[in-house]
Image (tube, rainbow, N blue to C red):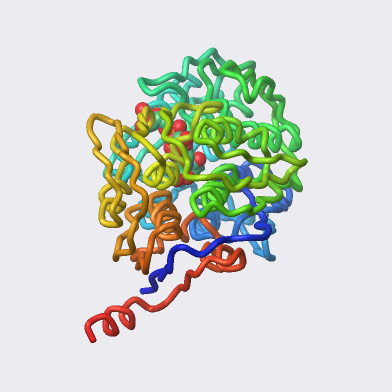
Amino acid sequence: MDCYLVNGGAKLSGTIQVNGSKNAALPILAVSLMTTGRCAFHNVPAIRDLQTQVKILNTLGIESQWHGHTVTTKVVDSYNSIAPYELVKTMRAGVCVLGPLLGMRGQATVSLPGGCVIGERPIDLHLKGLAALGAEITLDQGNIHVKAPRGGLRGTTIYLGGKFGSSVLATDNVMCAAVFAKGTTVIECAACEPEVVDLADCLNAMGAQIEGAGSPRITIRGVRRLKGVEWNVIPDRIETATFLIAGAITRSPITVAGGRPDHQLAVLDTLRQMGIEVRRSGTRMTIVPADRPKATEVATLPYPAFPTDVQSPMLALMAIANGTSIITERIYPDRFMAAAEMKRLGANIAVSNGQAVIQGVERLSGAPVMASDLRAGAALVLAALAAQGQTRVSRIYHVERGYERFEERLRKLGAQIARVPEEAVVAAEAG
Ligand code: EPU
């Protein structure tokens, strides 16, 4: 297995281009199941999670081709509506085929996604929403079966809120199923994330009638069929934030290009509170290098507030800030796996009850660390960029689930980072 070797302290410069959004592309690819027409999706990042999603779609009778960042799809067989455990267990977002399959084929079987390192991730809201449309739901041998009633799904008003607020993929699933329901469906307490809007816009381009995406109330008027589509996925706001923080943590004037600053307001605001200005010009955001960042306080919440997916990268920045910062994690209270590893780099972080208190230190120092999940892994790389000496980041397959050619793109900005076989490094260290 490969690891990253990072020599911290290098200043970065230049421009980095943001890729398409992983979390928008995942449910958008699943709309291929909802039409007999050909679809072409552009700006799809070539990362592990999207490859897994395409494999899931292939098992569901979709023929697909990748050309760079474009994926073309066409249904060639609609016989199988079972998404296999072997694939869904590796990527929880596989559950987003549930709504499209139920709507289009009248039934679906998806293995129940298991636990996940960032905490408990139930799917009760997905099932509650689909049941409200009339679907019969059974659980059997680790699989969820959903089946439309005789006469088909029926539109209704659904309150889709849970104890943590709205759910992104539950909103996606219910919206997709409702596209083919008879009558009108209203989703109240819908997720407002830009990825939900992109999915709704894509479905509308296929002939769906969805209004209100981006607000807590989405109205879907049922239609009989959808046509094929050619769609450009929105830029990845989490990748954008990760690279902005790479600039902030190394105090380097890098430009992140091709992003959507309007999707980034909470992150930009938090950076500003830390004394880091970001100059905006169209789709370009440039870090204005500053002195040591100031400590601040932030809570993760559904969009448009500060995203949970940027919590770990922000933890890295706060680790070197001047003063005591606090992050309260309100989406996944247990998502602080990065903290323990950052302590190995010299960070001073105390985590309890979904809150991290970070006493900023002047300097981190390199050490071997391990990525536990995608965002924690990216955060460790960011911390390593600012640390003195060498950091080895293991289990980088987590990072590569969500960031395409992460180390190569950082290297182009001047970061001293290499992707090397871990055994060789360990052997060299052993002498
Ligand atoms: N929740 C429930 N019941 C449900 C569904 C969710 O209680 O049926 C809870 C969750 O446990 C969580 C909260 O609701 O506390 C929000 O979870 P949500 O359902 O919105 O998460 P998701 O849709 O499964 C997406 C992203 C995640 C991101 C979250 C929150 C995709 C493919 N994944 O997951 O992305 O953290 O929204 O914004 O869109 C990542 O990219 O690293 C990642 C984990």
The structure residue drawn at horizontal position 75% and vertical position 45%, both measured from the top left corner, is: 229
Residue 72 is left or right of residue 61, and the answer is right
In the rendered view, tell whether residue 331 sits above or below residue 340.
above
Residue at (60%, 31%) from the top-left corner?
265
Query: Which quadrant is home to the C terminus?
Result: bottom left
Residue 83 in the image: state x and y as whole percent. Answer: 44, 50
User: In the rendering, at what x and y percent does residue 124 appear?
Assistant: 36, 28
Residue at (24% x, 38% y) in the render = 350
Number of numbered discs visible in the structure rendering: 0
Q: Quadrant of ligand 1?
A: top left
Which of 138/378 is in front?
378
Q: Is 22 on the left-hand or right-hand side of 370? A: right
> Where residue 262 appears, x then y in whole percent?
67, 33
In the picture shown, does residue 204 fall above or below 403? above
Q: Nearer the viewer, residue 335 or 216?
A: 335
Which residue of the protein is positioned furthest toward the top in this rendering? 157
Residue 367, located in which quarter of the rendered image? bottom left
Examine the rendering and report whether any part of residue 109 can be seen.
no
